[in-house]
Amino acid sequence: MTAPDRVPSSELAARLASASVEISSRGNQLPELRDNFAPGIDVTITFLPGDNYRHNIETATALRRAGFNPVPHIAAREMPSQLSLEDFLARLRGEADVKRILLIAGDVAAAKGPFKSTRDVCASGLIEAHGFARVSVAGHPEGHPFLELADALKVLAAWRDWGRRTNIGVDVVTQFCFESAPILQWIGDLVKADIGLPVIIGLAGPATPATLTKFALRCGIGNSMRALRSQIGRFGRLLTDTGPDDVVRGLQSAPAAATAPIAGFHLFPFGGLRKAGEWLRNYDRDPLRPAERATISRTRSQNP
């Protein structure tokens, strides 16, 4: 690959700079968020097993008042009734001016009400009835835990078609990986299937290898775990935190056509908001490492 082919697009770098971030639905993370992230970004709000949706409304309202764009998770299986879901959505719009939601099935095996999946929430008609502008759904570059690739693509195609019918923007937020190859392969699969949905790349924020391993096992991250193990082996005990630098550089170094569907980035702050914010501010957006830049410079000087 020639040097010009590896220069990152300014658009991809700008999308990284404005990455969204996730906060827990429990505890008061707003002061730390304010200290480390600029107002105006999207901030997703988790919906953990056993959460009371009324507290999530309060969190969304506090984020809006602080100048952030709240993006609450809607956990389908956690909704005990259609009336609860309708109240949740109506109050998110009315009290927190929420325009975008992120739909998940939820981390419980059995549904607490009539909604077993995100598609059931979609079929309720409540999303369009309450005037949401955008809906995000999950993407799994390393494979869906319960669906083969062909079936997962059919689900995304159904979301694409629903968005077109309802005139609601639909995008895909990916699970995090520890290397770029699975992401690029998965984006290629989406392009071949003509899915046509914008993709927001999930990044694991800086954390210790032990912390990242814990979350990876919990989230079903498989193949790219070898990249994390490689970094542990390379740096040993000297490594305190591992950030998503290699993943981002891999994406930025890919041909422009391979990353065309990427519409943004999302940080999972596994090591905390402070570390995630510092990484985002200090990350070198040039995908070429210093040694690589020196090699290219020597090559150019030898071949004027």
Image (cartoon, grey):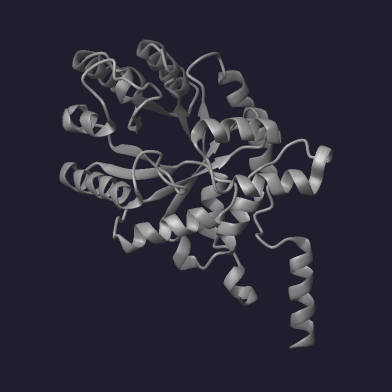
Decide which of 199, 48 is in the foreground and name it: 48
Q: Quadrant of the C terminus?
A: bottom right
Compared to 132, does 190 lie above or below?
below
Residue 131 shown left or right of residue 59 in the figure: left
Residue 35 shown left or right of residue 291 in the figure: left
At 73% from the left and 37% from the top, the residue drawn is 241
Compared to 208, does 77 lie above or below?
above
Residue 38 shown left or right of residue 147 in the figure: right
Q: Residue 274, how many percent across, how many down?
A: 67, 29
Q: Residue 176, how many percent across, how many down?
A: 52, 42
Q: Quadrant of residue 196?
A: bottom left
At 36% from the left and 21% from the top, the residue drawn is 96
Q: Quadrant of residue 48?
A: top left
Compared to 185, does 276 lie above or below?
above
At 60% from the left and 44% from the top, the residue drawn is 225
Question: Looking at this rendering, what residue extends furthest in the bottom direction?
Answer: 304
Visible in this render: residue 38? no
Compared to 205, does 116 lie above or below?
above
Decide which of 90, 244 is in the foreground and name it: 244
Decide which of 193, 199 is in the foreground and name it: 193
Q: Residue 99, how many percent across, how many down?
A: 33, 32
